[in-house]
Image (cartoon, rainbow, N blue to C red):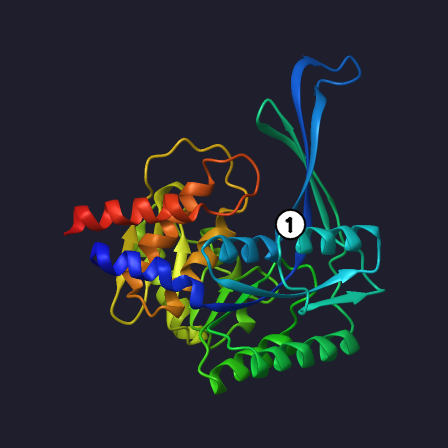
Amino acid sequence: MTAREINKMFTSFKDLRVLIIGDVMIDSYLWGKVNRISPEAPVPVVSIIKKERRLGGAANVALNVQAMGATPILCSVIGVDKEGSRFLELMQKQKLSLKGILKSRSRITTIKTRVIGNNFQMIRVDEEVEHDITQAETEQFIQLISYLIKHERIDVIIFEDYDKGLITAPLIQHVVSEAKKNKIPTVVDPKRKHFSDYKGVTLFKPNLKELKDGLKMEFDQSNIREIQKAVELLRSKMKIDTALITLSEHGIYISSKKTKKIIPAHVRNIADVSGAGDTVTSVASLCLAMKLKPEWIAIISNLAGGLVCEEVGVVPVNRENLQTEVLAIATKKS
């Protein structure tokens, strides 16, 4: 890609509309300092300085899409509880649409509380339920998604699956079928429970652990040939156009019909890897909607994932910083 093409692409992101289906949560942070060990147990004592609440899970994907200039439409289910109301307040504060959010009396709103001491995560405490939403709620949710696909101009659909019970096999099958009818590409950030249900999607983005768990096979993570063999099995078994495998500090591997390539990670000062997968999924989806070549989808999403790892906590990617780094890569390649 030329610098002109890259700049045009980043400008064109504003024209994209992204439907995001997935489990949402509130990321709660307790920020503080550690100066001593507790006399009660061999654990650090964190003196809290600041408390903060952020949108998390699939909502973080929405924030990343929004940060890139595109329009996210988030579809999820929250509880009829105090935290659910706070979640909606956070959505409104970020100017995110509420049209895809349903409320359930059978669930609580997921909260993940992270205690950060001296800029390092000390512990995380989760409040959640993981059972599937009811059949009636699934049917209602499917109707809502179908309505949005029909009445909104959707350019790409993202499944952001955290195994919290929102995404079910019937839901996946219906949405993938609707997407194909409407020629909308689909992108999946999977978890183990429904890994094999995402047959026929456009782009599938597991990490190495998810790939192993999903295929129920072992392979040497340091052996690229074994990784390639596993990925080709995945693509063949699930009829996936493109697989994008995040390799942690080793970068990212992309496999499609014509492209099979590892994109190395860039040297960075890693502060926190939380939310990096969300960012990779978000940016890869936008690039897919723009019909970029697979190699560039991998390059750009890999850079985006690395950038957010330089920040503590779950944060969306900085569009300007990403554009600068993509332009620098393009200059080296030309």
Q: In the image, 165: left or right of 205?
A: right
Provide residue 270's location: percent of width, then percent of height.
44, 33
- Count of residue discs: 1
Asked whether residue 264 appears in the rendered view, the answer is no
Provide residue 139's location: percent of width, then percent of height.
73, 80
Q: Residues within 10 Å of mark 1 (few under 14, many from 20)?
A: many
Q: Which of 288 and 5 is in front in this view?
A: 5
Residue at image coords 29%, 50% = 263
Q: Nearer the viewer, residue 155 or 197?
A: 155
**41 lies above or below 177:** above
Q: Which amino acid does label 1 sit on?
A: Leu
Q: Quadrant of the N terminus?
A: bottom left
Provide residue 88's location: percent of width, then percent of height.
73, 56
Residue at image coords 30%, 49% = 326
Residue under circle 1?
Answer: 55
Asked whether residue 323 appears in the rendered view, the answer is yes
Provide residue 103's location: percent of width, then percent of height.
78, 65
* Element type at mark 1: strand
Q: In the image, 89: left or right of 261?
A: right
Q: Residue furthest left?
A: 334
Residue at image coords 50%, 69% = 17
**44 lies above or below 273:** above
Residue at image coords 37%, 73% = 241
**21 lies above or below 303:** below
